[in-house]
Amino acid sequence: MTTTYRYLPDTKQDQEEMLDFLNISSVDELFEDIPPDIRLDSALNIPDAVPESLLVKKMHQLASKNKDANQYPTFLGAGTYDHYIPSVVNHMISRSEFYTAYTPYQPEISQGELQAIFEFQTMVCELTGMDVANSSMYDGFTALAEAASLAAASTRRSKVLVSKGVHPESRAILHTVAAGPGYAVEEVDLTADCTDLEKLQEQIDKETAAVIVQYPNFFGSIEDLAEIKKIADTKGALFIVSANPLSLALLQAPGKLGADIVIGDMQSLGIPMAFGGPHCGYFAVSKKFMRKVPGRIVGQTIDEQGKRGFVLTLQAREQHIRRDKALSNICSNQALNALASAICMSALGKQGIRHMAQLNVEKADYMAKRLQEKGFIIINQAPFFNEFVVELPCSVKEVNDKLLAEGIIGGFDLGSDYGCDHHMLIAVTEQRTKEEIDQFIDVLEASVHG
């Protein structure tokens, strides 16, 4: 047979030898200590085993039922985006020394992994304008919740304010995480497509630990960070910004606008969509909060021979210090995905990332203007990056079904999260061509006007 068997099962002889070594006569004896009344007394409801070649064929048939961005142009964003990934990224992260590395506990044999993380931290700081970044986190959603917990613990205040322009899933996780430390989460309404600054001024008080906004926000609109910072300062609250790192190639860095903590998701730089994960969160702070950052921070040093080296400088994790003193229990780093982002940023370079970001702005702007020419209403009033909201005269689901029938993955339905049943969030990245954008508009116009 030509099939490669990746997994070799135990033979009957192997099983007999293991039983003999354990001085027992059957596998059932291994489970004698488990009470009979809680043991499974019937066969598992799973299909019978099949040869690997047939199983691989079956899995390919199931996978082919999915319609992905390799087959259809996608205008679906809302937190996960179809961006260009240089081919060198996959080649590098597939090397065994990176692919199998998890935690660099022994610096003397982990210099490559440690340097990769150090470079990742450095590039995150350059993009965000912050002093210190950690070695990464699970994703941007949990990073936001960790930032809020840091603020509450540092200020010893009882609540945080979060704009409704922040991703709905980030807000949901924030509410869940806040229940542990016991701080309250209050949401600030929007005016049109941005945070309502008057409402923010009304809600902020001396018990506010932090004000949290997204940049660009969930609708793609660019919030006025400078004004929000001024409001936060009136009550001594920390300013937390959840920022798309790709957009920071063009937008002013949050750190330059007074942010105390900047977090976000690196998926837009080097990490494939993969049907929603895994992602990689980043976490950057001003120097005064360096020792309060969850997770790990890799530092640069010199060995006894004067050679450059890398070490884990800070590790405020429950695995390294007393559990009750740990800053977080959900702060494992995403080393492989962080490496992918670092390689992507290195391959693109400063000019490449800036050009990529510029294409996102220009292509989204082109599509929005074409839709307006066709009579559609664009909700965004503020400048937007690569997403915007269009109002439809019918349901978003109906339009998306017609788009899919024509080989196009449509936008995100805002109905369930914002109660806007006829509002579609459209993402236009550098991957979309003029022909694809025009085809989307043609299908949309035909489906709406007949």
Image (spheres, rainbow, N blue to C red):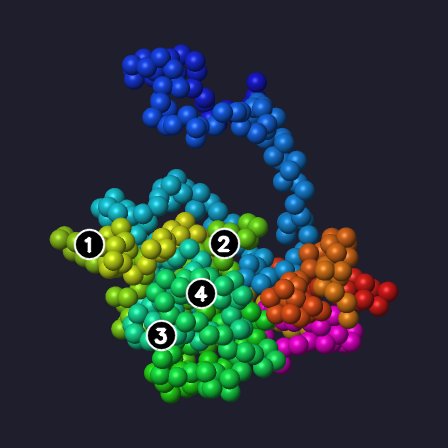
Q: Which residue is mark 2?
A: 271
- Tell me where the magenta segment starts and ends, as one range: 369-392
First reached walking from the N terminus: tag 1 or tag 4: 4
Relative to the observer, which residue lies in front, 223 or 323?
A: 323
Do the numbered discs 3 and 1 sit on residues whose CB atoms are within 8 Å? no
- What's under tag 3, amino acid-wise? Ser
Q: How far is disc 4 from disc 2 in space, using C-alphas? A: 24 Å
Q: Which mark is residue 307?
A: 1
Q: Say left or right for 119 vs 279.
A: left
Q: How far is disc 3 from disc 1 in space, using C-alphas? A: 47 Å
Do the numbered discs 3 and 2 sit on residues whose CB atoms are within 8 Å? no
For the N terminus, which image quadrant?
Answer: top right
Marks 1 and 2: which is nearer the front? Answer: 2
Q: Is residue 116 visible?
A: yes
Question: Which secondary structure lies at badge 2?
Answer: loop
First reached walking from the N terminus: tag 1 or tag 2: 2
For the C terminus, which image quadrant?
Answer: bottom right
First reached walking from the N terminus: tag 3 or tag 1: 3
How would you rate the neighbour count of disc 1 (Cα within 10 Å): few for under 14, some for 14-19, many for 20 or more? few
Q: Quadrant of residue 369?
A: bottom right
